[in-house]
Image: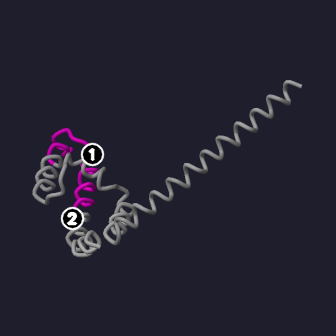
Amino acid sequence: MQAKYLAQIIVVGAQVVGRAFARALRQEFAASQAAAEARGKAGAQSAAASSFTGMTVQEAQQILNISTLTPEEIQKNYEHLFKVNDKEVGGSFYLQSKVVRAKERLDEELQIQKNDPPQQKQQEHT
């Protein structure tokens, strides 16, 4: 008799957790769609670049220790981190590769932003 009640409790608990998970998943999906629509074309290009390179802009900024996307700051930090991670001075090829990929990702993002500002401004005014 107790086993029956225990089984019912487990089934009901699993249903509650399943419903909560499904609801949270739907909310997250709706939020990501809304964010993608808000970003517009540049956001779609940026998302595609993140997918292609396997690195988000935020990750690339963390790797290069950059707070703002300026070509000068990117280049300065890239050169420094590339040199200190050189294998010949005891650095890591893995870290050096991460630095190169981060710079490529940020350069790509700068290019996307450079090509798309007029559309973003039009969307902000409407």
Picture residue at 46% right of the left edge, 57% below the top: 31
Residue located farthest toward the top when viewing the structure as drawn: 2
Q: Please, is residue 122 above or below residue 95 in the view?
A: below
Q: Position of residue 93 (x, y in %)?
A: 26, 47
74, 19: nearer the viewer: 19
Q: Please, is residue 51 above or below residue 40 in the view?
A: above
Q: Which residue is mark 2?
A: 110
Query: Magenta span has 89?
Result: yes
State the SS at label 2. helix
47, 13: nearer the viewer: 13
Q: Is residue 70 left or right of residue 8?
A: left
Looking at the image, tell me whether mark 2 or mark 1 is earlier in sequence order. Answer: 1
Q: Quadrant of the N terminus?
A: top right
Q: Which residue is mark 1?
A: 95
Spatial distance from mark 2 to mark 1, Cα to Cα?
A: 23 Å
Q: Position of residue 79 (x, y in %)?
A: 13, 52
**Marks 2 and 1 in Cβ contact (< 8 Å):** no
Q: Please, is residue 47 above or below residue 28 in the view?
A: below
Picture residue at 65% right of the left edge, 47% below the top: 19
Q: Which residues lie in the magenta part? A: 83-107
Q: Is residue 44 left or right of residue 102?
A: right
Picture residue at 74% right of the left edge, 34% below the top: 10
Q: Position of residue 69 (x, y in %)?
A: 18, 57
Q: Position of residue 74 (x, y in %)?
A: 16, 55
